[in-house]
Image (cartoon, rainbow, N blue to C red):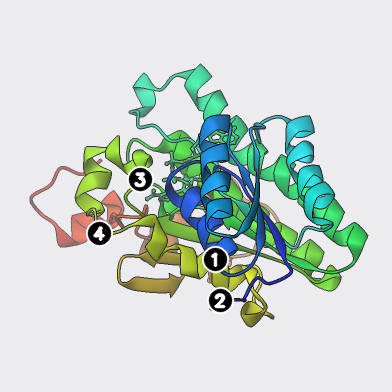
Amino acid sequence: MDGLMQDKAVVVTGAGRGLGEAFAVHVARAGGAVVCNDVDADLAEQTAATIRRHGGRAVASGDSVADPAQAQAIVDRCVREFGRIDGLVNNAGLNYEALPWEDDAEQARQLIEVNVLGVLYTGLAAIRAMVGAGTGGSIVNISSGASLGQRKLGAYSASKGAVASLTYSWALDLEESGVRVNAVCPLAHTRMVWKSERALRACPPDRTPARIAPVVLFLLGAGSHGITGQLIRCNGPQLHVMGQPYLKQPILERPTWDTETVQKAFDEVFSAHLENYGLEKRVPPRLRKLTDTSSRIA
Ligand SMILES: NC(=O)c1ccc[n+]([C@@H]2O[C@H](COP(=O)([O-])OP(=O)(O)OC[C@H]3O[C@@H](n4cnc5c(N)ncnc54)[C@H](O)[C@@H]3O)[C@@H](O)[C@H]2O)c1
């Protein structure tokens, strides 16, 4: 796919290591000019220098996506250096594991500031530039399978669910302006995975960030025209579209609902329609009692 990003300029946040570094290198290899952003400015510069050493076009930005003025500066840098912005990979992110009763409010706030507000601030700056220029563009947000719910990942899952919702909403708002917005749910052996025994078990070392980069590159490039509002998951050998949340039938209607009629609705109708929940697809206790006689019912 050499030349896929020829004459295009792309911002990749969190490009100092891990997935972001791979995305930046692959964009440059496909002919694109890249702003390699990372709050770890030395690492951002290393990625940009590597790209330049191989004949690509790249500049580094050490701004934090979690600050609206700095997020704007990342996008401005792209327009100033390369005369345009065609793509944004909203990749910078934080992660930690905690049981809900041991979670720390300050750590949760920091995570939300980067994973949600960082995506929002950088996205809004890019959207303003893209819509203003009238030349369209492609935004690829990095979400996660964890957005479906995972144990010990409450704050992280919520942040990635927010990224999914932003993706759907922005895709609706921007379709007419020719800016496409999609998200990728990756799994790759990075620092984020090294920190978690469970993630390490799910993600062997051969799941390198370079295996996710082609999916991001495809969504940035013209070959994905007509594709917007989608969450795409790439997990080792698997590539698939994530299902969208939807309003599930049956939808019962009556003028008002009191506790008694809600109870009746659940006892007589919805019990059969409860959904398995979380990424692990856990059967709700009320259904489990029909299938599993050994476990205690909550
Ligand atoms: N690795 C996986 O399996 C996996 C799975 C699902 C989703 N993700 C997502 O992929 C993205 C990249 O993760 P990774 O695994 O490469 O992690 P990583 O920790 O290796 O890299 C994340 C990078 O983001 C940078 N960053 C953090 N805060 C920033 C800020 N405020 N401004 C700019 N840069 C900042 C960090 O310095 C770091 O270099 C994240 O959004 C993560 O949630 C990763």
x, y percent for residue 98: 35, 28
The amino acid at mark 2 is Asp
Give the CA distance from mark 4 to mark 3: 11 Å
Q: Which residue is mark 2?
A: 2
Residue 154 appears left or right of 287: right
**Can residue 53 be seen in this snapshot?**
yes
Residue lying furthest left = 294
Query: Where is the C terminus found, in terms of image quarters?
Result: top left
| Mark positioned earlier in the residue sequence (4 or 3) | 3
**Can residue 231 be seen in this snapshot?**
no
Label 3 residue SS: loop
Q: Are marks 4 and 2 in contact (CB under 8 Å)?
A: no
Q: Which residue is mark 1?
A: 29
Q: Are marks 4 and 3 in contact (CB under 8 Å)?
A: no
Q: Which one is closest to the eye, mark 1 or mark 3?
A: 1
Q: Which one is closest to the eye, mark 2 or mark 3?
A: 2
Q: Which residue is mark 3?
A: 190
Q: Which residue is mark 4?
A: 206
> Callout 2 environment at 10 Å: few (<14), some (14 to 19), or many (20+)?
few
Label 1 residue SS: helix
> Callout 3 environment at 10 Å: few (<14), some (14 to 19), or many (20+)?
some
Which residue is painted at 35% across and 32% down in the image?
Answer: 97
Mark 3 CB near ligand 1 (8 Å cut): yes
Give the CA distance from mark 1 to mark 4: 21 Å
Residue 89 appears left or right of 150: right
